[in-house]
Amino acid sequence: MGELNYLDTSMPLEERITSLLSALQTDEKLLLCAGQNFWETRAIPRLGIKAFRMSDGPRGVAYHSSRRRRCTAFPSGVAQAASWDEGLMVRFGEAVAQECKATGAQMILAPAINITRTPLNGRTFEYFSEDPLLNARLTVPMVMGIQSQGVAACVKHFAANNQEANRMRNSSEVSERALQEIYLPAFKAAVEQADAWSVMAAYNAINGTAACENPDFLKTRLRQQYGFRGFVVSDWFAVRRTSSPEACIKAGLNLEMPGKGSHYRFKTIKAAYQQKRFSDDDLDDNLRGLLRVMFLTGHLDSQVDIGQCNTVEHQTLAREMAEGGITLLKNDGDLLPLDPSSVPKIAVLGPKLKRRNCWPLWGGSAGVWPPYEVTPWQGLQAQNHGRFQWVNSPKEADAVLLFVGVGHRPGFDSEAMDRRSLHLPRNQQALIKKTVAANPNTVVILTNGGPLAMPWMDEVPALLETWYPGMEGGNAIARVIFGDANPSGKLPLTFPKQLQDSPAHQSERSYPGDKRAVHYEEELFVGYRHFDKYEIEPLFPFGHGLSYTQFTYSDLLIHGTTFAAEDTLDVSITLTNSGEVAGAEVVQLYVSDQQAADDRPPQSLKNFQKIHLEAGQSHRVSMKLPIAKLRVFCPETNQWQLKTGSYLARLGSSSRDIRLQQAFCVEEVNASIGESL
Ligand code: BGC
């Protein structure tokens, strides 16, 4: 086949890459270092290399990148995370990859996995969680699902990209320990466990060096430590803040995006090459990952699977995901699910009742424009089946459904700008008070992307967090309200009572930052780790979420009492659905080191399992915990270490609702580098 022998699919992958590299001329290689337009790399027709196409984003293929195809709008990241359901994440990954292919792209710019450090982050709705273990456990199946379809996942935004305020200019000043324990584990897991084919370098700098020209992050950690073999793409226009093309290329940034308006045009990159500011080896190293992913996705092969978009299966999945993530925060007197025999007349109102939430660019790059969207009002009508009668005024009704929330607008839940406040708009707070005064049986249904302060919460008997539930949201919400689906979502982040209670909001240095530096002064105390340490009562704790049934925990058993570094703890309990309807519970395992120094969090999530049980059914839930996962990062030695002594395994329904606990001991420690989480 001469110089085109890389087209031979029977050749081993690495040989195909080497063969293609040797066929490329220097100018062609330089052309492949930056995109040609907003979504594509350059084509090299001489060698049969087509443009490699990418599309946004983390809740479905975004309209702005879909060649005007309307695609399935799934629930947003925080709603996905609230399901704590790894099986759903695999199916979601598969579906979104199919849709990505159907729009002609080979890579989806997802998942978005930055840690929720501040509840004001405008992109909280896109991200998963404040907890590194939950974050990693959701990232891995999603990446695997996407890539199982021959589409590349692009895990973003690497790294410490935890706010939108000054996102293009600031530097995240963060300790090695917080990076290792909080901010990096999900990226590491995405590469080590799911072999993520691409990673997006963030806008921000990390400890003074822009993420896009940061060899410590892009080479040392990603490639040398985690074993990454794909390509790093810049966040869009992020390269503008870097110092030179050679700094990016040498640091391990493989592709600058977008091409239109790229900072380092062909001429600039070529001049740097001609002046020997980077070598042929640097250039080849830089291209290998991109070419590898082109081969892995089958992009350079002739048979291309055309994918599937907007199938009934994807729409059903969107509804199941919405139902899985809807979180019942409060339900006094079991007001929900609504029972037609006791509350037949229902008033429905509020600004979110007839509102659609899926639009092109709503919320920024995660906006998806689906072929249809079921609003809450449409869902209530479709799912009612004659059970309830709608009335106009709360006074005439037996119960009220009040739909409030924020929106994907700058200053609310949106990319490019953080939220201005933790509160609902004033008029909505007034509406809640007025409605509850008129009818105390008021259910408040929230549509929003992250923690809210709720000074009105005590007055409201029932509260349902629906997040941004996607195009099938209205059906999912109605099914939950009517009891056709039992809510099983659990908060993937803490809801504080007030902003000052949040870890990042102790000073302006820490948020939004001073002199373009954001100092992560809370260190490890992110999310519930902070609330636990300072004994602050949250509005709703991490892991919280009610059900229409009750679950009892009994018979905790840990096989053994004393363990060595190489052992695995086997923790089991009996979980019983002691209520009257089927439902699902997320059993959460937290571990406390009982001799922990003051600078350690009181407890950390170490495992969880989501279990579905019929009414009256019991199940023995068994969870493994390798003792190595108890290692902590030691700032003095810069290594992971296991501490000897006594620990407490705590099992419960939330971080603040621990039902059973038992002590165990760790001994015989050889301090060494090892695993975390
Ligand atoms: C966002 C990325 C997104 C990219 C392309 C950037 O502004 O930060 O998450 O994938 O744009 O739309």
Image (tube, helix red, strand yellow):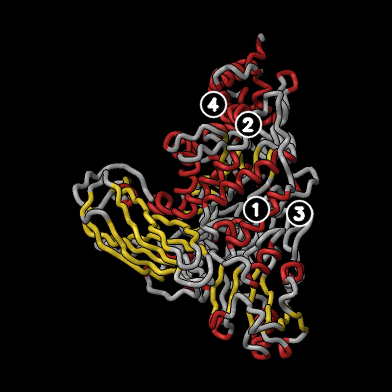
In the image, is the residue at mark 3 within 8 Å of ligand 1 by its beta carbon? no
- The span from disc 1 to disc 3 (Cα, nearest Å) is 17 Å
Say which amino acid is labelled 2: Thr
The answer for how far apart the CA atoms under marks 4 and 3 are is: 38 Å
Indicate which disc, 4 or 1, sits on the residue closer to the N terminus.
4
- Nearest to viewer (mark 4 / mark 3): 3
- Crowding at label 4, few (<14), some or many (≥20) Cα neighbours within 10 Å? some
The quadrant of the rendering that contains the N terminus is top right
Q: Which numbered disc, 4 or 3, marks the residue that appears first in the sequence?
A: 4
Disc 4 to disc 2, C-alpha distance: 20 Å
Q: Which residue is mark 3?
A: 369
**Closer to the eye: label 1 or 3:** 1
In the picture of the structure, the residue carrying the numbered disc 4 is 285
Q: In the rendered structure, find residue 317 and report the number of the disc placed on it.
A: 1
- The answer to which of 560 and 484 lies nearer the viewer is 484
Q: In the drawing, what numbered circle is on residue 427?
A: none
Gap between marks 3 and 2 measured at Cα: 26 Å
Inspect the image, locate mark 1, and give the three-letter code of the amino acid beneath it: Leu
